[in-house]
Amino acid sequence: MTAAEKTRLLAERVMGGRITTAYGGGWFIDDVFLNQVSWQPLTNLAHAGEVLEAMVRKGFQFDAQDCGVGKYKSWFRAPGVGAQAYAPLLSTAICHAALLAVGVKEEEL
């Protein structure tokens, strides 16, 4: 799955974004238009923080760990759901764990 596909899934499944083809494609999240240039949660920690906040609003608990040597672990937990991911960037680990928690298969990432 490409970074663009992951970002689209984050916008739809985690952030509750409405997909639009206007302005070259993108999403409306809380009535703000975002696209691949303006919203990059896989590499931008501030944008990944928005994903984290959305997951907490959905009832998930969150934790993260610096595993050393340029590797981070992130996980989300809710009743009946547990998902964790490792990545070289904390923002990517947050996003991958969020996608797993909302049902995206690990082999798809």
Image (cartoon, helix red, strand yellow):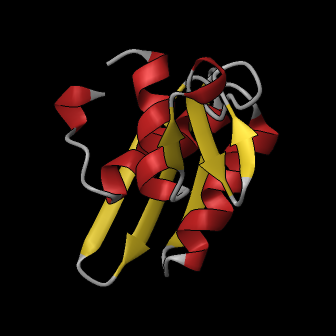
Q: Quadrant of residue 77?
A: bottom left
Q: Position of residue 96 (x, y in %)?
A: 44, 39
Q: Is residue 27 above or below residue 77?
A: above
Task: Determine the residue positioned at 38% across, 47% down.
Answer: 99
Q: Is residue 85 above or below residue 36?
A: below
Viewer-proximal residue among 88 and 23: 23
Q: Is residue 93 above or below residue 75?
A: above
The reply, left or right, for residue 14 in relation to residue 65 is: left
Task: Determine the residue positioned at 72% across, 18% down.
Answer: 37
Q: Position of residue 9 (x, y in %)?
A: 41, 40
Residue 62 appears in the figure: yes
Q: Quadrant of the C terminus?
A: top left
Q: Position of residue 95 (x, y in %)?
A: 52, 42
Q: Quadrant of residue 69?
A: top right
Viewer-proximal residue among 51 and 80: 51
Q: Quadrant of the N terminus?
A: top left
Q: Position of residue 85 (x, y in %)?
A: 41, 42
